Amino acid sequence: MSVRNLSKDYKIYKSEGNTFLNLFKKRDYKVVHAVKNLSFDVKKGDIIGYIGPNGAGKSTTIKLLAGILYPDSGTCIVDEKSPWVDRKKYVKDIGVMFGQRSQLTWDLPVKDSYDLLRDIYNLTEAVYARTLANLVKKLNLEELLHVPVRQLSLGQKVRCELVATFLHEPKLVFLDEPTIGIDIEMKREFHKFVKEINQELGTTIFITTHDLDDIKSLCNRLLIINKGEIFFNGTLEELFTEFYIEEKIFVELLAGTAYRLPENVRIIEKEGNRLVVSVSEKGMTGKMIKEIVQNNAVVNIYPEQNKIEDIILDIYAQMKK
């Protein structure tokens, strides 16, 4: 996938009292730049995490890349096809799963929805039977195939939605908030399934999520968007390098003893003989631990490495300034 200078604006009309009269007069509006000149590349087999604060432009991007929306400008090319120009050909090779919308028919058994998707994608009986059997086995759905969708729990629906998304073995899949509301056990099953499909079929997967467990468990690359523009594009390792925040050291001293700390650390918590200090300079944590041990009566000491949650929260705080 090659995305170049992709942009999409919306007009937000101002309310002026009587809604009925507004239909017959010209109203003022403001332009919201939902997506502004996005450019990035996605390699075959990548699992991309696409994150950002609410209103950053994530859902608009997904709708553009899936061919649901037309952009105001810019291009997107996937296997020599444009999502909105070559839509009929393009959608045969993609899958889309929206966390709060269903591909399954509410009152019908799950299997009936799969049969309908078989016809929509023109799958042969042999291919359909093979693919369905493989997906049902991976997600342990045998007992759910003949249950009406309305009787499924949220976790069961997610598993059934995954089958619907991957039934035609798409080359590119968009997962928009796929784990919203599901429990820890189901989330673990979801991660396992996505990894297996990615490894077995080389499926390229694009995930938008607020759940950073999805990012840590699945993604080899991360895109962060803010106000319609790319804020970061790289690996998780590059994220930790570029957006370093102070690392913490937990120190337990011998009761009743004084302490002497290096100049490069500061106390952020203190309770009795326990201290939590932070290291302001990158790469100095090991040296600071050594100095603290040499100059103090230390009972226990250990560092806490930065978590992706801390870094993302720090980035979002920067975005609000």
Image (tube, helix red, strand yellow):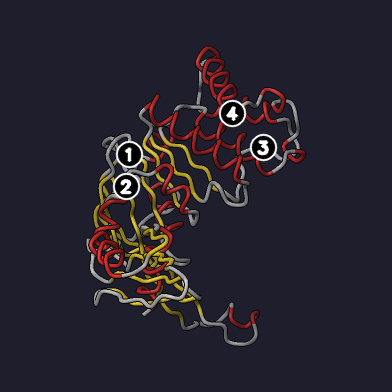
Q: Is residue 246 left or right of residue 210?
A: left
Q: Earlier in the sequence, mark 1 or mark 4?
A: 1
In the picture shown, does residue 293 fall above or below 42?
below
Residue 124 visible in this rendered orientation of the protein: yes
Q: CA distance from mark 1 to mark 4?
A: 22 Å
Q: Give the labeled residue for mark 3.
A: 156
The kind of secondary structure element at disc 4 is helix
Residue 299, image quadrant: bottom left
As helix, strand or loop, the secondary structure at mark 3 comes to helix
Residue tagged by mark 4?
Answer: 139
Q: Residue at x 68, y 27 (%)?
A: 112
**Of pointers 1 and 2, the one earlier in the residue sequence:** 1
Instruction: Find disc 1 in the rendering and name its residue.
Output: 46
* Earlier-in-chain disc, 2 versus 3: 3
Whether the residues at callouts 1 and 2 have beta carbons within 8 Å, the answer is: yes
**Distance from the alpha carbon under mark 1 to that under mark 3:** 27 Å
Q: Label 2 is placed on what type of residue?
A: Arg
Image position, residue 47 (x, y; %): 37, 41
Q: CA distance from mark 2 to mark 3?
A: 29 Å
Q: Quadrant of the N terminus?
A: top left
Disc 1 is placed on an element classified as loop
Q: In x, y percent, where is residue 14?
A: 52, 82
136 vs 291, nearest the viewer: 291
Q: CA distance from mark 4 to mark 2?
A: 26 Å
Dot 4 or dot 2, earlier in sequence: 4
Residue 39 percent across, percent down from the top left = 25, 55
Tell me the amino acid under the disc marked 4. Answer: Leu
Q: Are marks 1 and 3 in contact (CB under 8 Å)?
A: no
Residue 153 occupies quadrant: top right
Q: Is residue 22 above or below residue 165?
A: below
Disc 1 marks a residue whose amino acid type is Asp
Residue labelled with disc 2: 221
